[in-house]
Image (tube, rainbow, N blue to C red):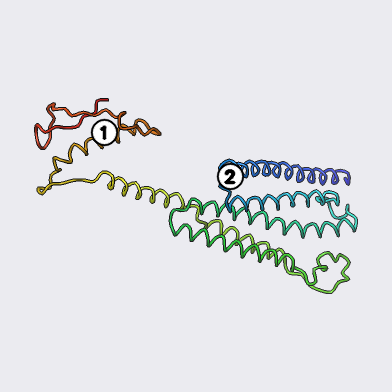
Amino acid sequence: METDTLAVDQRRQNELIVTTVVFTSLSFLIVAIRTFVRAVLIRKFGPDDATILVALFFSVGYLAELLLGRENGIGHATPNLSLDNMYNLIKITLAIQCTYYGAVNFIKFSILLMYLRFAVTAALRRACYGMIGFHVLFLIVSIVVTLAQCQPLEKMWDLMGTVDGQCINTTAFFYCKLTCTNSSHSSGPVPSSNSTAHSHIRRQHHHRHHHLYPTYQDADGHPAASQRESRIASHLRRRHLRHHRGHRPAAHDLHVHICHRPFPTKHPGEPLVRHRG
């Protein structure tokens, strides 16, 4: 029975280590490629790239702490550990908590700073800055409470009860922290980013369209004859561009000419611009 328990604990430990090694290695590869592209190829290394590098540093530290915990029997039941192993695991757990908070929050900083590069409205930028401030405060509070959860700190690994002091209810602090984190995720600026960006682009397109292709009218409210040909040519040119996206034709590529074929207009017989094709 004891052999089966040891085998289960060992399998749990192996799964923990293998999973962490695989995903940390993938993270390292992806962040390295991103950093190379942003810093070397396009030369636009920004704050979001710097913060993701800091998050990667914390993730590698997290992996190192787990490997150190493996040497002290992390994942095994307490009766199967020596007193030194338990002392070391408690100290390693304290380091893991601080490293975890750093990795998670710097990932959030990187995401929010990336949103700022895409933000097109003042409201979205204010929301991103507000979330960054919230997570900065949250990170500071988490680190301070973790390092001060016992007074004195040696009380945390005092298994024999020889140190006078007291510790907070870490379970209550964990659930409070989890509630705050979930609330910040649900109230983040992500859902409104697409709609605000699209509306801003539509407004810009509407303004640019009416600026480049204004409507000319005469005293009677009818389109002016002197501008009518220009408007039709502009319409034909826009239709030509829609069929050749990505290529803006030069003036000699757009063949237009004046013809006098019958065409139902407000002023019969006036010349119209036709597209030759």
- The tag on residue 236 is 1
Q: Residue at x 35, y 49 (%)?
A: 204
Left or right of 48 in this view: 226: left
- The N terminus sits in image quarter: top right
- Residue 228 placement (x, y as % from top left): 17, 39
Which residue: 66% across, 66% down?
141
Above or below residue 113? Residue 24 is above
* Residue displayed at 61% across by 65% down: 137
Amino acid on which the number 2 mark rests in the picture: Arg
User: Dividing the picture into quarters, in which one does residue 8 lie?
Assistant: top right
Query: Measured from the top left, where is residue 12 in percent x and y?
Result: 78, 45
Residue 199 horizontal side relative to residue 34, left or right: left
Q: Secondary structure at mark 2?
A: helix
Amino acid type at mark 1:
Leu
What residue lies at 72% left-to-right and 41% top-to-bottom? 22
Relative image position of residue 113 (x, y in whole percent): 55, 54
**Numbered tag placed on residue 38 in the rendering:** 2
Q: Position of residue 243 (x, y in %)?
A: 34, 30
- Horizontally, is 270 left or right of 184 in the view? left
Q: Quadrant of the C terminus?
A: top left
Residue 241 horizontal side relative to residue 61, left or right: left
Whole-Å distance between the Cαs marked 2 and 1?
41 Å
Check disc 1 and report its element: helix, strand or loop: helix
Sooner in the amino-acid sequence: mark 2 or mark 1:
2
